[in-house]
Structures are given as structure tokens and as C-alpha cells.
Amino acid sequence: MRHESTRSSPKRHFVWPVVIFTTVLMLLSGCVVYEPVPAYVPSPSTFDRSWSAAIGAAQDEGVRITSEDRVKGVISGSRGDQDVTINVQTQADGNVRVEFSARGPKGSDPGLAGRISRAYDRRMGR
């Protein structure tokens, strides 16, 4: 009578780990991992930020913008019978100077330029 063993042969125990290791190695060798590339996202320039804030501040106070000349740094508009002029200039030290003026008939709205200036400060986070 022949006695059959339920044991696996030693070769069979050796084959499965090799097959699994080889399969994993083949799968991983097909993966490519790229390093992240740092991206430079420029923030708006001080002039651009000031320009936008000046226009927004004037509009907050009901000024209708009639012209914008970025090269000269002049924004013009009106509110009722008052003419509004905003000058935005980059100075030699890199700072931006913003001036607000409102002109109209006597007694029209003497506080308009001051209110636009305060709206500008709020928009600039001051």
C-alpha cells in the first residue's frame, strides 16, 4: 500500500513567493513618480492692486468712471455735477501714491473725495 503525503514539495513553497515578488516588481517598474514642479504664480503688482482698488472705491461711492489711462495713471469719472480725478503713480522707491480729487459747483458734495479715499483704504485692507 502506498502512502500519499499531503505535504507540498519544498520547490512549491519556493515558487509562490518568487512569482509574487516578480509580479510586484514588474508592476512597480511601470510606475513613474514625478517630483512636483514649483510653480510661480505672480501676485498682482502694487500698482495693479492700487489701480483696481481706486476704481472700486470710486464706484463704491457712486462715481461713474468715464476714462482710464493706465500709462498716465489717471482715472476720471463723475458723480452728479462733480468731476472726480484719481491719480495713481509709482514713485522712485516702488511705493504707489494715490490722490483723489472731486471738483464741482460750490456746495455740491465737499466730502466726496474723502469718502472715496476711505473706501480705497478699506479695499486695500487698511
Image (cartoon, rainbow, N blue to C red):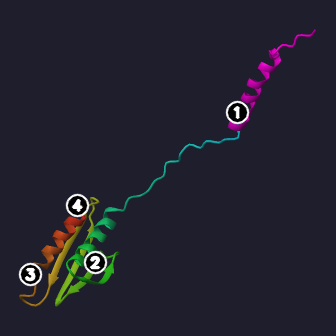
Q: Is residue 39 magenta?
A: no
Residue 97 percent across, percent down from the top left: 23, 67
Amino acid type, label 4 = Gly
Give the structural element (helix, strand or loop) at label 1: helix
Could you tell me how far apart the alpha carbons at marks 2 and 1 are, in whole angstroms? 67 Å
Residue count near mark 1 (Cα–Cα under 10 Å), binned few <14, some 14–19, many ≥20: few
Which tag is nearer the camera, tag 1 or tag 4? 1
Q: Are marks 2 and 1 in contact (CB under 8 Å)?
A: no
Amino acid type, label 1 = Val
Q: Which mark is residue 110?
A: 3
Amino acid type, label 3 = Pro
Residue 5 percent across, percent down from the top left: 84, 13
- Residue interval drawn in magenta: 1-28
Could you tell me how far apart the alpha carbons at marks 3 and 1 are, in whole angstroms? 79 Å
Q: Which mark is residue 24?
A: 1
Residue count near mark 2 (Cα–Cα under 10 Å), binned few <14, some 14–19, many ≥20: some
- Examine the rendered structure and indicate whether residue 77 appears above or below residue 44: below
Could you tell me how far apart the alpha carbons at marks 2 and 4 are, in whole angstroms? 22 Å
Q: Which mark is residue 125?
A: 4
Q: Which residue shows up at 22% across the image and 86% down it? A: 78
